Image (cartoon, helix red, strand yellow):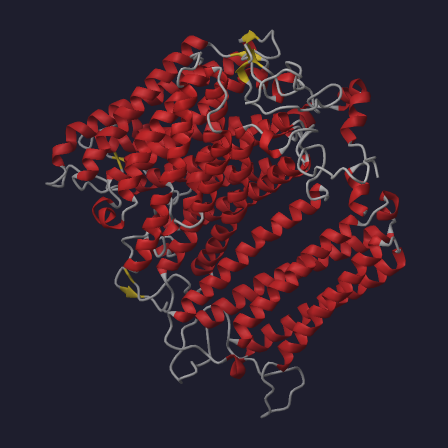
Amino acid sequence: MSTPTTAAVPTKWWSGGRSPFNVEYGKLMMWYFLMSDAFTFGAFLIAYGTIRFSSTSWPNPNEVFQSYPGMSEGTSAPLVFVSIMTFILIISSVTMVLAVRAGQEMKKNKVVLNLILTIIGGLAFLSCQAWEWTHLHHEGAWWGSNPFLNEDGTQSSTNFTNFFFTITGFHGFHVFSGVIINIIMLIMTLNNVFEKRGHYLMIEKAGLYWHFVDLVWVFVFTCFYLI
Amino acid sequence: MSNEAVLHTPSSYAVHDDHAHDHHHHETFITKYVFSQDHKMISKQFLITGMIWALIGGLLSVLFRLQLGYPDSKFPWLQDLLGKFWVEDGRITAQAYYALVTTHGTVLIFFVLTAGLSGTFANFLIPLQIGARDMASPFMNMLSYWFFFAASCVMFSSLFVETGPFSGGWTAYPPLSALGQASPGSKTGMDLWLISMALFVVSTLLGGLNYVATVLNMRTKGMSMTRLPLTIWALFFTAILGILTFPVLFSGFILLIFDRNFGTSFYLSDLYVNGTVLPNEGGSAILYQHLFWFLAHPEVYIVMLPAMGMVSEILSINSRKPIFGYIAMVGSLFAITCLALIVWAHHMFVTGLNPFLGSIFVLFTLLIAVPSAIKVFNWLTTLWRGNIRFTPGMMFAIGFVSLFISGGLTGIWLGNSALDIHLHDTYFNIAHFHLVMGVASFFGMFAGVYHWYPKMYGRQLNNTLAYIHFWVTMIGAYLIFWPMHYEGLAGMPRRYYDYSIWESFKQFAELNRFISTVVIIVFATQFLFLFNFFYSIFKGRKVTNTNPWGANTLEWTTPINPGHGNWPGEIPEVHRWAYDYGKDDREFIPQTEPVGANESHH
């Protein structure tokens, strides 16, 4: 808008006086923070892999994760509940995209609607996780105690549950912070903070964080439930 | 498009300039000196906190050197001073000795050479040298300092708990660090150590994000990346390394906290402690070492790179010559940054690592010699036939190069997994890393302080005290660490409490006493620097020239005592690189001067 250049002169992005990526510093910081956080989760998952592959056998996730709320005795539904959780989280990413898009179009009401949907999705995911943790806890699983046998019938070390609760807990904490951030965004939107600023960039940054947390879940889901 | 809206709105500082006089009335003592958001004040906070930690860390080393140098002597007065935990029967206790070496290492590496060095100079130099009013987010910058301050408080408090501070070495290897029953130092002291380090990770992350965003986004007009002074390049890569590696340490620490407090066995398996069988099973202590060294190896470059950057700058300015091989310098910084991430297991050659894996890490480790050598030769060729001004900053910069060469050469020995079997955890290793990253980085820091002191406080330091400080520290560093190579080659292991009871190491009694004596002298000499620093803040010679060193970079275009916002008017525009010294018969050409029509190309 303040670059009165003729069409023929290419913009010198790197020569100073402007952002080389055409983003403000907050978004740049968010990207670098996400890179950093990716390393945190990467370290966790690699630690998990290291221990798992140095063990002779490991519990079968299809047998461990086979319950859902209101299930009758004697039935099993391997991975159905966690698939629903995953679906909810991915849908919440979609609504987040819609919120960001609505922000770019400066449509306040649409932003509000989609933020509310995203928050509901996040809370639903957290509730599912709370239910699953409680259920596992009732079965005797917790940090330092593992009731599940290895796939080959031998006694399993406690590291199956140790890693499960630590890493899904750490991810759940990220989802929780994401929900808090989204609630703050919602309040700010309702108070017309972004309307007055003339842009909804904060929503975009919150969106980056939310998508990242969803993406991490895909890896956590794969590593704990599928493999 | 929405980004455009933000990028081109005038910054709040532009408003600040117009109302500069109104603004100062609102500044209270608290907002100016305590919860300041001015990058210059925050950098001074980092520096002074770092100096206090350096004093504590140095004092700890004097104490354990007393034990090593004079194992038969008694120091009843120390007992009166420090109490029974530390000194019993006139001798430093074994428990205290381990606590001393552990805290010495932790404090100097993290609090002094990371926070004190890059916290100080990244905060001070990045906005001033790239032409910005402040950091991208001054508020996060302030938080970064206060998280560091909180980490400092927790670490300091651990010195006073009943069971003593953590005593399992700065690497905090489990199972010793994970099991409270294993040693007194692994109890409350270790909890405090972990809390302190977690706070410290938050501090470096907040700082690092700010440094990167500022360097990328806030360069003034004309300041392309290839016109950046090498200090900025170095601080930029340092910040990226920190952003990528500290989180891995953080993960490792979280797992350690669970092992300590919540009955998990991430790092624990098959253990007996005091005759009791522990139930923990299935964990791996080596896993911790991988997570730890993934940070802790790049950490030595986090410590080194800022020193390298500042030394490059100071050598060029005071040789009155352009830096030799600017692009090669940037390239080698980049190469070191990349290689730093893939050599961590060379700390683990003797842990039972697969020898094949070891050989790969040998290769990468030895590759670091290439960019390191590029840097050394470029520094030497910058000095070559220069019109050298031996200012105190320049002395320390040259000292840095000397120490980096001496310490770096032994790195080639240690990087070989076969030689490492003999040298691992000996005094040879201690000598190597103290010279190459400990003392060398300290010299970089001293060089930086001496060089930028006029910009920081608008006054000059006393040169005589500075030269005494330099020569005693320089000679002392070699006298302390050179003999340790011989001890290490003879197989003398590190971290032992008393060598006089070992037949093989008795022969070094005299040498150890000599080293300890030099340590005390060098430590005492640092008080000259401290006196000089604090005295000169108030009473030093006032700087009368905005550019006392005749330097090209932007910080010397600000007023002698720049206010918040750095430049009173417009931010200057940059037209050339930072190293036009001795060009076209001119001693120096500042970056702000447009390129003349008849100017020669470099």
Snapshot quadrant of residue B221: top right
Q: Which of the two residues, B362 or B160, is positioned nearer the viewer here? A: B362
Counting from the top left corner in percent of width and height, residue B233 is at 54, 34
Task: Single out the residue that lies furthest toward the bottom.
Answer: A74
Left or right of residue A35: residue A23? right
Residue ID at (59%, 88%): A76
Left or right of residue B484: residue B440? right
Residue ID at (56%, 41%): B203
Left or right of residue B32: residue A184? right
Left or right of residue B380: residue B423? left
Counting from the top left corner in percent of width and height, residue B94 is at 26, 41
Residue B238 seen in the figure: yes
Counting from the top left corner in percent of width and height, residue A37 is at 58, 54
Snapshot quadrant of residue A7: top right
- Above or below B571: residue B356: below
Residue B90 seen in the figure: no
Counting from the top left corner in percent of width and height, residue A223 is at 52, 70
Q: Which of the two residues, A143 or B181, is positioned nearer the viewer here? A: A143
Snapshot quadrant of residue A105: bottom right
